[in-house]
Structures are given as structure tokens and as C-alpha cells.
Amino acid sequence: MFFCRLQVVDYYAYKIFKQVKNKQLLTQSFVLLFILFLCSGHDLFIRMNSYYLKPHSTSTLRLFNGTFSQSENIITRNRMDDVVITGPSFLKHPDTTQWYDSGNETILSFNTGESGTYVAGISTKPRTIYLNASDFNEYLEHDGVLDILKKRKAGNQMDKPVNEKYAKHVKTIFQVGELRTHNYLHKLGFPLEFIPLQNPYELKPGDFLDVKLLSEGKPLSGKNVYAHSSTNKEAVEQHLITNNEGIIRVKIKCAGEWYLRTIHMTKTDEKNIDYLSSWSTLTFSIR
């Protein structure tokens, strides 16, 4: 079976690929190109034209729903559950009317406050999808949710269809002016959330960044996390696993725009729902 380690394969895109392949409507060369395209799942990222802003200036947050390099869909306003921007003496919850769409990107215009390190985050409302057993098992394997797949095998549940409820919770950290502050430690209270333990804007290439992963406010251990930079010439992401304190150590190999990403799935007793999944990303920049 095909598995892309560059970035988790989006199950729904993979399913389309499989159907088309079975119908033999693609040539062998085009299949290869299509696979490479699918190697980036529908993660959600907050990106900025610049992560270094002036105090009391206007900037934008850009939502990329697709891959880190290309947004494939907008985020409709009714999907937004919480939007927050926080910094020194600064706390805003922008209204959904402040967003606008440009192509496949969803964009928020905002004004910065005084000098310091800021955090912005967006949490989406959950959605539910029904998947038959075969489709769900393939999804787990191709998206690397191997702990759930292992439990299904051990519990003889490989033939059981599921209802999955999923949501996405994303953050970015940016710098306003010259003063570095501790606001990067601010917890937004999302169901799944990355918390850097050092200020990224005090680091340089060659340094390490320790990051804690929280699930419902508690450290999440044994979770696969992937890190990468848009300027890194290496093809693969750093594959990291959180320790008993929920912490990973990211090697900052180069300057540029960075991201972290993970997916956390759990069994639930919620009525008519079998699994809850949370997707989380964090972006920042290094000089």
C-alpha cells in the first residue's frame, strides 16, 4: 500500500485516487504526479505574509486549508468556533464579519498593538462523517493513526463501520516590534494545542525548540508530531514523538517559515459517535 511520509495523505483525496486508479483512467505517469499531489493532506494552517510586524500596524492572517504551500478550500464562517489574537495588553476575538475570501484562502485583517510576541488561533466546530469499515481502516493506515488501527485489530473491530467527529485547532506565533515577551506561552484552551517552551523569535538556525502538546489542557504523550520548514531543502519532515510530559524537541535546521502538525484520535462514548479526532498545527518564523 502507498504511504506518504512527506505529509499525511488526506483520506478523502486518497479515496478519489483509488477509485480513478481502479477505473484505469489515468496513465502511469499521471498517476505518479497525482500521488505526489496527494501527499499533502487537508491540514489547516495560519500563515502570514510576514511574521515580523510593526506596532500599531495592519496585517493579515491567511488560512490555508489543504497543504502548507497551497490552500484548496476556504473556511466558511459558520465553521469558526473561536478566533483569538493575544499579546502584551492585547486580547481580541475578531468577529466572523472581519474575514474575507481571496481565491481559496480565508483572510483576516487586523491591527497590532504594542511591541511584543503575539499568538493567534482559530478553532473550528466539529463535523461528523460516516465511514464504512474498509474505508475507515484505510484512512487510519494512510493518515498514520496507527494506535487506533492497532486497537481495532486487537478488538476484532476491523469490520465495524464508524461515525467520526473531527475538528481543527490551529495557531501561529508572530513578533511585533523588537521586544520579546512571554505571551508565546499563552494557552488558548483549544481541545488540542501546541505550546512552545521557548520564544521562537529568540532562536536561530542550529537551536532547538521544545514544544508541549496538550489535549484538553493535559500533556499528551506518545503522539506523532511532524515538523518542517518551507525553506528546508530536505524532502521529509522531522518525525517526532511526544515524551511522557507531552514534549517534543524540534531541531531548527534553517531560517524561514516553520510548521508543526499532528492528529489525535480517541474512542468516545458520545451517542452515535465512535471516534473523536482533533487536528492541530502551529506556525512561526525563524531568522
Image (cartoon, rainbow, N blue to C red):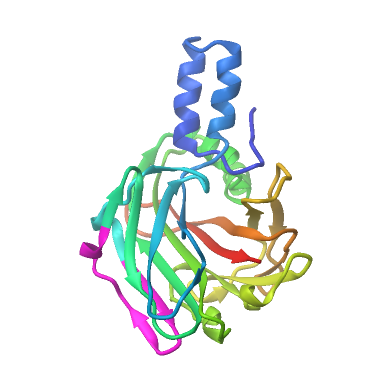
Residue 157 position within the rendered picture, expressed as x and y whole percent measured from the top left: 53, 41
Residue 126 visible from this viewpoint: no
Magenta-span inclusion, residue 139: no
Q: Is residue 24 above or below residue 263?
A: above
Residue 76 appears at what percent x and percent y?
27, 52
Q: Nearer the viewer, residue 87 or 280?
A: 87
Where does the image place residue 229, in percent across and percent down from the top left? 64, 54
Residue furthest left in the image: 97
**Residue 40, can we see it?**
yes
- Assign the C terminus to one quadrant of the image: bottom right
Identify the residue at image location x=47%, y=58%.
49
Give coordinates of residue 155: x percent, y percent. 58, 46
Residue drawn at x 28%, y 71% is 94
Q: Residue 286 appears in which quarter of the rendering? A: bottom right
Looking at the rendering, the stretch of residues picked out in magenta corresponds to 82-99
- Quarter occupied by the N terminus: top right
Front residue of 278/29: it is: 29
Going by the picture, which residue comes out furthest to the right? 206
Q: Please determine whether, in this image, residue 63 is positioned above or below residue 112.
A: above
Question: Can you name the residue that lies furthest to the bottom here?
Answer: 89
Up-down relation of residue 191 to residue 184 (above or below): above
Please state if 129 lies on the left or on the right of 234 as rendered.
left
